[in-house]
Image: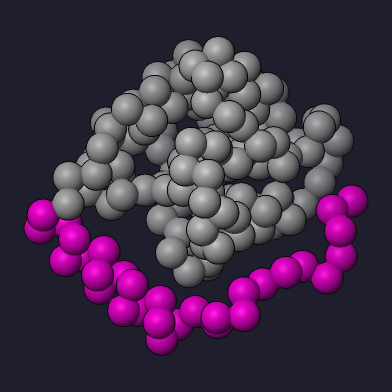
Amino acid sequence: MNSGEIFIGNDHGGFNLKVRIVDVLEKKGIPVHDVGTGSTDIVRYPYFAQKVAGAVSEGRVSRGILICSTGIGMSIIANKFRGVRASLCTSTFMAKMTRAHNDSNILVLGGKITGELEALDILDAWLSTDYEGGRHAISLGLISEAEEVLCNPAGWHPSAPPP
């Protein structure tokens, strides 16, 4: 696993914010693997969520970022993957808490609902906050137990390539 590398994926609604975030991550010296769409042409977000959530779920990377118009669709599909704790954040407080208490491994942002400066502050808070462990590990253990029963170990790989 390349724990320092971050996979980033986006659909058309997240393209502009993705470009800015990739620039910021690269300036911080964080390796980025961009698996998102390269334009604002309409595409289907589950294809891109699968690439990021799949990489995290399979242990190829420890963290990812997903961006669509609201972040809702990306977070819904990403959280279907075993071991993924994708968190839609609209404030720095949410970003800090989801890292500290939930050990969030995928940050989800809404490219059309969160301004660029706020999104960059959220990103910084999410990147710089460590997981606290302790009593929070009990809840994460329960989530892992539920995944054993609820998640298909074969995973999901879409049959058609992104348009």
Q: Do we see residue 113 in this rendering?
A: yes
Which quadrant holds residue 98?
top left
Q: Is 143 a magenta residue?
A: yes
Q: Is residue 83 left or right of residue 10?
A: left
- Nearest to the observer: residue 40 or residue 138: 138
- Nearest to the observer: residue 15 or residue 4: 4
Q: In the image, what residue occupies the spot 55% across and 38% down?
A: 6
Report x, y in % for residue 85: 41, 56
Task: Tell me which colouring the rendered structure shows.
Answer: one colour
Q: Is residue 136 left or right of residue 89?
A: left
Q: In the image, what residue occupies the spot 61% across and 50% down?
A: 52
Q: In the image, what residue occupies the spot 37% across and 48% down?
A: 104
Q: In the image, what residue occupies the spot 72% across and 42% down?
A: 35
The part of the chain drawn in magenta is: 134-163
Report x, y in % for residue 97: 25, 40
Q: Is residue 91 above or below residue 115?
A: below
- Nearest to the observer: residue 133 or residue 110: 133
